[in-house]
Image (cartoon, coloured by chain):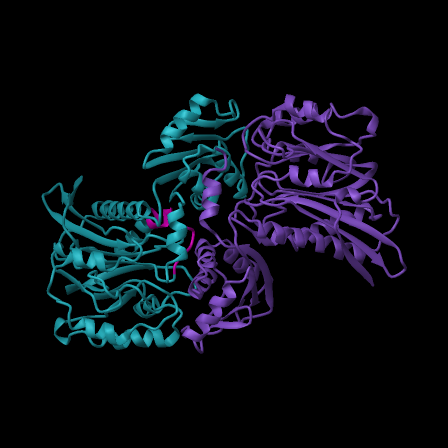
Chain colours: A cyan, B purple
């Protein structure tokens, strides 16, 4: 048994972690930072998950030289430039930049993480100049959380204290960024998790992979998968405390809540919708249908228009290629049956109820295929004019 | 050798074909028709391709009782109601409606085709009432072409005369509708083709399948596949003329040109873009990348914004899971190299050129993966505010 308390603190309130951010000129004319770091004074066990995009960015190629799990204590993060499609030179730029970190900090295996536009070399001089302005003994969680944002409209930061039955406790905290290009095909954004739990190396990667599968891999803003997606989990062991089940639950909870914040902040998104598919022939078939629902333009625009047009839900399931039967299908909006073969036509009473459900900031669309035990839930958002505006104008 | 002439005529100018349309009340307060027919006075060889959506609509289930290829001479078409997800009753409605066709027309194996909202029974009385108002000996191609439209902004109608070297000739004509829900996973819209070519039954389906693969299956407006997609090809043989190669080329040309008209009229679309992928490990890998490009929201919004942000092209290729290598990739906008590993960064001169190319109504994005001989071209359009508006408000 254990208890999870939400704290109003940041990633650097976890014992032994430090962070800061400054503006080094990547965001011109802005107070917001563009260069941040997270470090631990002691060497951590680190686990990571990265994008599955074949054109993964230079910082990921660089970090992968240590393997997905490694020992280290430092990550430098920049916004506005993804350092992707920059070839070998992009990796050399990182090595050069990291060689300018202070030598008195006992930095081991430092890595970089980048987000922004693809196809441009990092402005190395600006970043190296910025390193000198960072306070490496600061605990400016708030600044770091803000500096890593791109099209996000608010910062995403959570901190939990986990109390075990015997009175022991550990902390886990995380910051994330990500508003568009969020697709269930790996982590899909940047996320940095710090913990003082004493997690053994072997457990760390396994627990992170599992938690990412249940959180970031279940959300979709626009079905695109970026070149830079990274989740980095740093465990410095300072609390001396470890309970595998408690850590697993806390990690999953923090990543899931961040995933929901990312969806809520999906570019131009107004509502978060859970697409729960049950009764499928297999979990894989349920997953295919649920993910397709969360990505369908027609479903997403109907959500924006608050139009209880369940035909688009059915059509998307049918188009996903899985086994399904219109006689056995039931579609619910929250607890309201909006389609079953017994009464397919929407009368005005049910339509009115459906309309009210759709006006909520979040609700559930549940599809029972009535064929088996397979189930999966994916999470998505609506598609608004604002999404188009943001993405038509992103670079300019 | 043969020659293909474009005629400014409609589907009913093909010898032996008749068509008409009226408004039977499915489009209230409108001059536009909502109920149309196409018929031949003699029995035709008919070939068809239908949606791959597992929830295919009642008219398709009904027509499939004759098989994909069959002999017949009549199709009744309604707009505004898809007769989809209506179960066995939806099929019975069709049988009832078709039983009201005039008995003096020698109608053999009549079928129906529907487009519109999913999940409502056909307003049978209105349609049966409308049948009485249709002129079954009319050649009102224009009315029929207009009646089948939904969110389309213009009618799609083409007619070719094919002249063989020996002086013989035959005609082929077609109408189509389709503006959204267009995805390369089968025909994806409604299309009715009439010809007086004397095509043997065995060739007809083969040639139609091939032509659909090269036309409607290569275009995408929004990646969704409808429940009602149908292409129906009726050959009455009245010309007595048949040349397989000439017919194949003419059929492919008419379907491809209609496909481009559909893309041009894609909901809220401002430009048509060809996504040509070459140098892939296989044609299948090229196809996967090209189709993903034509469906990517980030690519589509960048096209709308006329932003030469080739990073989104690269990212989408990388996310498609095919084999690729950033050192070997070259991306062209028309003939302009916009990315190669030799000069990844876009200088202002090339950016200016790229911007001019993107301002065109149609252009080509070519991606050479540099790995093999696989190639495929998919066709897509941009995503505008207007698409969101149309689809947020479609039903209301």
Return the residue nearer the eye: A23 or A261.
A23
Specify whether B8 is left or right of A35.
right
Return the residue nearer the eye: A85 or B11.
B11
Residue located 80% across and 50% down the image: B171
Task: Reply above or below: A142 against A344.
Answer: below
Task: Reply above or below: A336 against A100.
Answer: above
Specify whether B286 is left or right of B388.
right
Q: What segment is highlighted magenta in the picture? A: A213-226
Residue A61 in percent (x, y) is at 35, 69
| Res A130 → quadrant | bottom left
* Number of numbered discs overlaid on the protein picture: 0
Q: Quadrant of the N terminus of chain B?
A: bottom right
Answer whether residue A160 is magenta in the image.
no
Task: Reply above or below: A360 against A265.
Answer: above
Q: Decide if residue A296 is in sight here.
A: no
Q: Decide if residue A259 is in sight here.
A: yes
Return the residue nearer the eye: B356 or A265.
B356
Answer whether residue A218 is magenta in the image.
yes
Q: Residue placed farthest to the right in the image?
A: B166
Task: Reply above or below: B126 against A364.
Answer: above
Residue B90 in percent (x, y) is at 62, 27
Residue A77 in percent (x, y) is at 25, 64
Specify whether B275 is left or right of A14.
right
Residue A47 in percent (x, y) is at 27, 59
């Amino acid at each position: 048994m254990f208890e999870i308390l939400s704290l109003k603190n940041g990633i650097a309130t976890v014992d032994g972690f430090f962070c800061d951010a400054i503006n080094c000129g990547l965001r011109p004319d802005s107070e917001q930072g563009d260069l941040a770091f997270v470090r631990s004074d002691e060497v951590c066990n680190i686990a990571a998950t990265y994008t599955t995009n074949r054109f993964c960015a230079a910082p990921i190629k660089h970090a992968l030289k240590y393997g997905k799990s490694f020992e280290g204590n430092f990550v430098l993060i920049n916004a506005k430039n993804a350092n992707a499609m920059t070839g070998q030179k992009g990796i050399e730029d990182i090595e050069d930049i990291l060689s300018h970190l202070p030598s008195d900090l006992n930095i081991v295996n430092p890595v970089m993480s980048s987000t922004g536009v693809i196809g441009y070399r990092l402005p190395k001089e600006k970043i190296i100049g910025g390193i000198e302005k960072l306070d490496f003994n600061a605990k400016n969680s708030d600044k770091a959380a803000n500096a890593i944002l791109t099209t996000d409209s608010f910062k995403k930061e959570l901190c939990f204290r986990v109390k075990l039955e015997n009175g022991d406790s550990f902390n886990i905290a995380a910051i994330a960024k990500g508003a568009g290009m969020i697709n269930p095909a790996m982590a899909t954004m940047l996320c940095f998790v710090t913990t003082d739990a004493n997690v053994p190396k072997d457990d760390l990667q396994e627990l992170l992979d599992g938690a990412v599968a249940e959180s970031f891999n279940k959300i979709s803003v626009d079905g695109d998968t970026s070149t830079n997606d990274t989740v980095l989990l740093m465990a410095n062991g300072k609390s001396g405390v470890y309970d595998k089940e408690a850590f697993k639950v806390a990690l999953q909870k923090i990543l899931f809540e961040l995933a929901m914040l990312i969806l809520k902040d999906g570019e131009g998104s107004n509502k978060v919708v859970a697409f729960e598919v049950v009764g499928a022939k297999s979990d894989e078939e349920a997953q295919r249908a649920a993910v397709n629902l969360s990505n369908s333009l027609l479903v997403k625009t109907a959500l924006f228009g608050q139009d209880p047009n369940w035909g688009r839900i059915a059509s998307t399931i049918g188009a996903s290629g899985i086994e399904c039967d219109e006689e056995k299908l039931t579609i619910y909006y929250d607890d309201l049956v909006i389609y079953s073969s017994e009464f397919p036509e929407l009368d005005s009473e049910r339509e009115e109820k459906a309309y009210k459900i759709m006006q909520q900031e979040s609700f559930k669309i549940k599809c029972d295929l009535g064929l088996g035990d397979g189930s999966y839930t994916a999470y998505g958002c609506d598609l608004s004019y604002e999404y188009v505006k943001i993405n038509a104008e992103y670079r300019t």
